Amino acid sequence: MDYDAGSQEYIITSFHHESPDLEGWNEEIKCRRNSEKTEVGLFTYQQALEPQELSFEGYLTVIGEDKKPRPTRFSFPSRHHPVPPASGSGFLTTFPKPTGLHPTLRLTFPHGVSPPGHGCALHTYLTLPSSVFVDEYQLSSPNFLAANNLRGVRALSGETDLEAPAWVTGKWGSTMLLELAHHARRQARLETTESQWHVDIPLHLRYLPPAAGGATSVDLPWPIVFWVCPAEEGSDLSGSPFDRINLGYEVLFGPSTIFYHFQPQPKEPRRSLVEQLQVPVMDLPASRWVETGTVGVIILGALWVMWKSLRVSLNDWQSSKKTIPPRKVL
Amino acid sequence: MSSPYFTPSRVFSSAIALRVIFLLYGLLQDAYSPFKYTDIDYMVFTDAARYVSQGLSPYERETYRYTPLLAWILIPTSWPGTFWFSFGKVLFAISDVVAGWFILIILQSPAGGAMTTKRALKYACIWLLNPMVATISTRGSSEGLLAVLVVALLWAVTRRRIVLAGMLLGLSVHLKIYPFIYGASIVWSLESPPDCTPVQKRPTPRTESTERPVSITIILEFFNQSRTILIISSLITFISLNLLMYAIYSTPFLQHTFLYHLTRIDHRHNFSPYNTLLHLSSAAPDKVSSLKLESLAFIPQLAISAVLIPIALSKKDLAGTMLAQTFAFVAFNKVCTSQTRVQLEKRHEGAYE
């Protein structure tokens, strides 16, 4: 939901990724009052003439006024695009096992990628819950970055404490923008599974609250991967009716930036792009004896050391007493 | 082994060469491998030193929990060039070698065992030619600095240079808090040399009871000249250093250098016997009794390391007592990280008497 103060418009936008019925959309739209204008349009995505534009073609009807739908076509420059097939296709997110307390987020690209234009850079944006954190000092060594196909951390904000356990952190989590070191596309005939390449991002888990069974699970959403390219001079990117701002990452770049998004390609179709990790934690029922056990062991150990020291002192005192009587005899 | 090659100059040259090799290898590994040779603490020290060289407080660097003195000493690491950045590692490595030299001298002195040069040298080799010790210093850990201070302290006590010993003790406690336990054993061991007067002429304490009670006499006799000088000298050094640092850096100095150690809850990578209890009481406070037993951990720790062991052992063997104290202090401590275990090695050396 959005409110445009300039034009005093209340904008409600809803998205569906599939129709509620199995056979497409069946809706009846009525014109409620004569003073209200209800406009219905049915469009489909069309290949745009300009590379940085989106184009739609379809039919437009104003309810109550038009007798027939009017064929319409319009295009506008858009900030966000799917990645052109020549520059990449999709990516897969996995956490190679075993994950333990230091999981690695692996992005797998099936083929090499190439920039869609001049001055473009490949990035990924991670949104992490507070149970996971990133060590920016680890990601500042050029050798380590190059070994994992990374170029560097471009932005990191949120809960970034390196030591705190999860029950002490106050923020919801953290976000990170990383630039990736892409592998160029090889020639078409070599595009077999061997041209697959990976990006490895080391993450760390905080200590999580104890649970029965000794393990708990953490949900990690898939990151997004995109090319960032400078827009053509003079293009007005805010004119798109589908323009989405305040996404979190686009403010890290200038206003004239185009994003080409990679399509997430999970191995099997699924409802949500979230990975679940099993995390070892303290087994609560098994820890009943921890307190008494620790205190007992410490007390026993301390008593043993004290007894040994006292025995040494007693021996010294007794042997010093034995030397005195001979002197008194004199 | 009475080889003509086993001389102090050769041993010390080898020790220096060993550290130089490790230093250079460390530079190589840092440059070409994703796994760093340099300790993460060294990056913390050098960052803090850089802040100080720019006129700021070293506590701008998060996780810097030491005295500003360390950042001051390491200011040259902020000068440009790879050599200057490694200045701290060089300093710590030199401290190692000097500590080894002190060990050699102590073992040869009458108060320290009166060993022959060759025998003392063999013991000193365990420290000087030990690759683990050399690695710790060349990685950039500041333990080498504290090692040389503590061994110098032991040397000063065996030479009866009490004022110097007091200053070294005060400086060591300012650097890392735990050396105060050595103060207890040194004070206890500094008894006056026994009287040589015959038994009949020496007045027994009972005949003086007409003037003052026995307990007061014992207390006054305890605080003989050496002990009093040591206590005063170390207190003056410690307090004036703290006042100086407080005057310059005010509350963050107190907070990070001293108070942090009372409230730290970082139980990651903790090898002490308390680690599971600390984790449990932090994560599930309702599952442990409300007695807060882990905060009483200092009672057995200090009772044993600062009271019992000094009283029982320090008059017999001061260096051995210091080893036992360190061992007890670490064993009963709430937190025991990998670096803590290295501190035990240093004390081990001095105990060969």
Image (cartoon, rainbow, N blue to C red):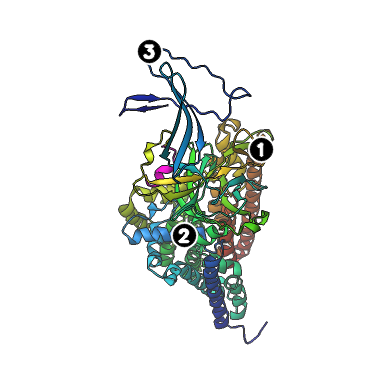
- Asked which quadrant contains residue A209, the reply is top right
For the residues tagged 1 and 2, is the chain the same? Answer: no
Question: Image height check: is A232 above or below A244?
Answer: below
- Specify the amino acid type for callout 2: Met
- Specify the amino acid type for callout 1: Ala
Secondary structure of the magenta portion, mostly? Answer: loop
Asked whether the beta carbons under mark 1 and mark 2 sit within 8 Å of each other, the answer is no
Question: Image height check: is A246 above or below A260?
Answer: above
Instruction: Give residue A123's position: percent from left, percent from top.
Output: 49, 49
Q: The magenta stretch spans which residues? A: A245-254
Instruction: Give residue A56's position: percent from left, percent from top.
Output: 47, 35
Badge 2: residue crowd in 10 Å (few <14, some 14–19, many ≥20): some
State the separation of the CA atoms marked 1 and 2: 35 Å
Depth check: B286 or B30 in front?
B30
For the residues tagged 3 and 1, is the chain the same? Answer: yes
Question: Image height check: is B289 above or below A279?
Answer: above
Give the letter of the chain under mark 1: A
State the separation of the CA atoms marked 3 and 1: 62 Å
- Specify the amino acid type for callout 3: Asn
Give the letter of the chain under mark 3: A
Q: Relative to B287, is B156 on the left or the right?
A: left
Name the residue beneath numbered marker 2: B43
Name the residue beneath numbered marker 1: A215
> Which mark is nearer the camera, 2 or 3?
3
Instruction: Give residue B47's position: percent from left, percent from top.
Output: 41, 59
Q: Relative to A47, is B239 on the left or the right?
A: left
Name the residue beneath numbered marker 3: A34
> Which mark is nearer the camera, 3 or 1?
3
For the residues tagged 2 and 3, is the chain the same? Answer: no
Depth check: B130 or B315 in front?
B130
The quadrant the N terminus of chain B occupies is bottom right
SS at badge 1: strand
